[in-house]
Image: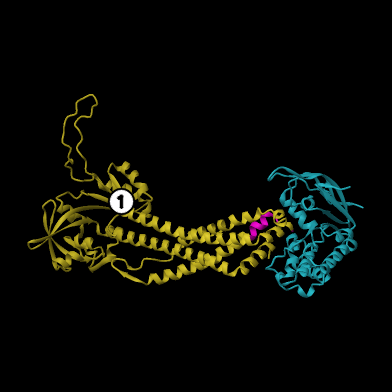
Chain colours: A yellow, B cyan
Amino acid sequence: MNINSDIAKTYTVSGRKQTMVAILGVLLGMAVYMFMNSMNEGFNRTSNESFFKSTPHLRVYSDDKISAPLQELSDAEMIIINPKIVPNTAKINDPQAIANVLMKQSEVKVVVPQVAMNVFYNNGKSQISGKTVGFEPAKGNEMFNIKSFMVQGDFDNLSSVSNGIVIGAGIAAKMNLETGDNLSITSSRGVNRVLKIVGIFQTNNSVEDKTKSYVSLSTAQQLMKESNAFVSDINVNFFEFNKAKDFAAKYSDMFGYKAEDWQAANESYMAASRMRAIVITFVSLTLLLVSGFGIYNILNMTVSQKINDIAILKAMGFRGNDVVRIFVTQAMTVGVIGVALGITLAIVLINIMKHVYVGGDIGYFPIRFEPMIFLRGTIIGLFITFMAGYIPARKAARVDPVSIFRK
Amino acid sequence: MMNVLSVNNIRKSFYDPIEFEVLKSISFDVKRGEFLTLVGKSGSGKSTLLYLLSTMDTDYKGELLVDGELLTGKSLDDLARIRNEKIGFIFQFHYLLAEFTCLKNVMIPALRLGKYSKEEIEFKAMQKLDALGLADQALKPASKLSGGQQQRVAIARALINDPLIIMGDEPTGNLDTKNTDIVFNILKDLTHTSGQTIIAVTHDMDFARASDRTIEMVDGKIRD
């Protein structure tokens, strides 16, 4: 062993209690950092998962237009008009061409043209308002993975039964419906149809369950009194959902229709999750920093206590760098042991929490081992320890031996 | 006989609290195997001079040569290497590293030098301790020894790299008469048997008188 590390080891071992306290500090800081960030990651993952059960990564649709002044000449008098939403049909022209272009983009995973509308589910005299979505069942399933939350019937029957409908469990419960029953619905265009229930789904999101239903594309087009070329939105899923907002502007320009990514469509949800991330990052980093101060403090004390040792080492021919190495080694020993134990504790905590049932649409506590977070924590932890050691070590290296000996 | 250390026209001033020239144009040579003592009243500049010679204090004007090599203007790292190899130190207080055994304390400068294997260094360190009558204390922590014993461990440490020059700042200043005699005889022996040079600052006039040459400092100058 190198003499510098040998001396560092002796100091570390002889100051056993201090070393332990410093290790404990790093251990706790590290464990909490990793645990909290893994938890945040888990929250984000589950909420995104439940989110994407009904929301596409990106939606192309025809946005409402406000009527513009008849003339926009700077030297002419403005003709007073009453701005209103232009009565157009939210129709996308030639949706198949757009869908084909989208499908050719390398980043796009699946494209689902759909017809969405508000409807009433009728049960005798009582009505439940809701929303129905029509698309090609196979593609719709590919995008929202609807089959995974079917509780009754078979989603595939939507394509084989011409007037089939799949309804949420909440609607079924309220109207006392089961697979095979008939359900009369009225669309916003006043079209009445009796549809046959081929399946019931349950998402654990009660608003969805109480209002939503799926039908085939042609049924939806009939409900809207539109031709078989009518599509109200084109849904797009990407291979990486985080990239959606990078493409939104590009698609808007390409097609002349509004392309809205899921983050823009759900600003308040995103703001809440950002806020959570900020709070957790702030708290966990502070804890790590505090453990860094622990090391700094203890090393600073060691340097003051060992000032005679440092002077004599320098007199005997140890260079400034050797002295830095001695104390940085000491700090890094504490850091490495603390980080290693912190990782262990974090893994234990995660494994315990993983098995805690919290209920609701979350089920078990949404946490798991996140390698990237552990890697990031380790790097930050070691960096903080290094700095906490380096600053007092540099002070030690600058000790002027003559001034010590002459006291 | 070759000069092992030369000082040419060295001057040094302190600036705090007021400018004060503590060494005024000092020149002398030290020959190989010489036992030199520096004496003088406190404030005469003898300790300041010793620390300049030790290469630890680099803030001076003039020239310092050790073993024919000009040391003035060298980098701190170079000076550290030269100290490690060529100069051994004995202080009034022993300055042993309390957490290490005596043996380890003696070994540290040699481990830093890295010229020999750890086993060889350990063997050599044991020899030095044995020569100073401390073989049985080798594995005790340095803090458990008596003052005289600690000073002898410090001497063993100063000798481990077979330095050209051994410098002492009141090496016997903290010892009783008996231990002073022991330490003095060890040092005297070294100059005669292994040709090592000793430069020591002392207050003890008996110690100075028994050395080969004494330089007396008065107000920053050498008294003729």
Q: Quadrant of the C terminus of chain A?
A: bottom right
Residue drawn at 19 percent across, 37 percent down: A67
Within 10 angstroms of label 1, few (less than 14), some, or many (20 or more) residues?
Answer: few
Task: Give the residue at mark 1.
Answer: A267
Left or right? Give the position of A146 relative to B204.
left
Q: Residue furthest right?
A: B1
Residue drawn at 59 percent across, 64 percent down: A333
**Residue B203 position within the rendered picture, expressed as x and y whole percent measured from the top left:** 81, 58
**Residue B211 position within the rendered picture, expressed as x and y whole percent measured from the top left:** 88, 59
Comparing A59 with A392, the one in front is: A392
Q: Quadrant of the N terminus of chain A?
A: bottom right
Q: The magenta stretch spans which residues?
A: A316-326
Comparing A349 with A52, the one in front is: A349
Q: Is residue B53 magenta?
A: no
Residue drawn at 72 percent across, 59 percent down: A312
Left or right? Give the position of B186 relative to B75.
right
